[in-house]
Image (cartoon, rainbow, N blue to C red):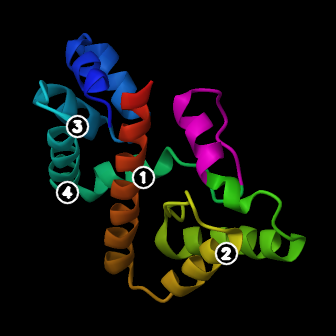
Amino acid sequence: MSETGVRALNALPPDAAEERLLSCCGSRAWARAMTGARPFRDAAHLAEAADALWWGLTPRDWLEAFAAHPRIGEHAGDDGRAAAWSRAEQEGAAGAPDETTRAIEAGNRSYEERFGHVFLIRAAGRSAVDMLSALTARMSNDPETELRVAAAQQAEITRLRLAKLLEE
């Protein structure tokens, strides 16, 4: 993570910082808390704060963050920073065989019916088959366990996106 990026984030007006941070994690409560936690000493301090503040949020805040993500195999509806990152992160789902794509689509629907939120996984570096396997395995979780698993995936996504944000 770029120390120049940390200094730039620290220097932004609060509303601009919050909007940038929302591209990393779709929870407004998290973005507000991160904005209020500035200044960050360095990238490590930023990452520590991101994790601590994330795990201090409520499940409602987590669900807000999850809702900012498209389904695996789908694209976000806008052209913003988060949408571009999501497309890049989901590269492993692109070009998957039709059978795998259909299984992911069906799995997404079943997952949402069971848990009430989008299936969330750190897709970066994973193939469509890997994501489908994780989706299938996680269907056996109870709702409370799955909420925490999805929250942990969001924390991983947030760390990756913070690194990208600091490199801009």
- Disc 4 on helix, strand or loop? helix
- Disc 3 on helix, strand or loop? helix
The C terminus appears in which quarter of the rendering?
top left
Distance in Å between CA atoms under marks 3 and 1: 16 Å
- Disc 2 on helix, strand or loop? helix
Distance in Å between CA atoms under marks 3 and 2: 37 Å
Upstream in sequence: badge 1 or badge 2: 2
Residue named by callout 2? 107
Hey, which quadrant is residue 59 in on the image?
bottom left
Q: Name the disc covering residue 157, or none.
A: 1
Residue named by callout 3? 43
Q: Name the disc covering residue 55, or none.
A: 4
The foreground one among 168 and 90 is 168
Amino acid of disc 2: Gly
* Up/down of 112 relative to 29, above or below: below
- Magenta residues, start to end: 74-89
| Front label number (1 vs 4) | 1
Distance in Å between CA atoms under marks 1 and 2: 21 Å
Distance in Å between CA atoms under marks 2 and 4: 27 Å
Can I make out residue 24 in this image? no
The image shows residue 18 at horizontal and vertical percentages of 30, 24
Upstream in sequence: badge 3 or badge 2: 3
Upstream in sequence: badge 1 or badge 4: 4
Residue at x 41% of width, y 47% of height: 160
The N terminus appears in which quarter of the rendering?
top left
Amino acid of disc 3: Ala
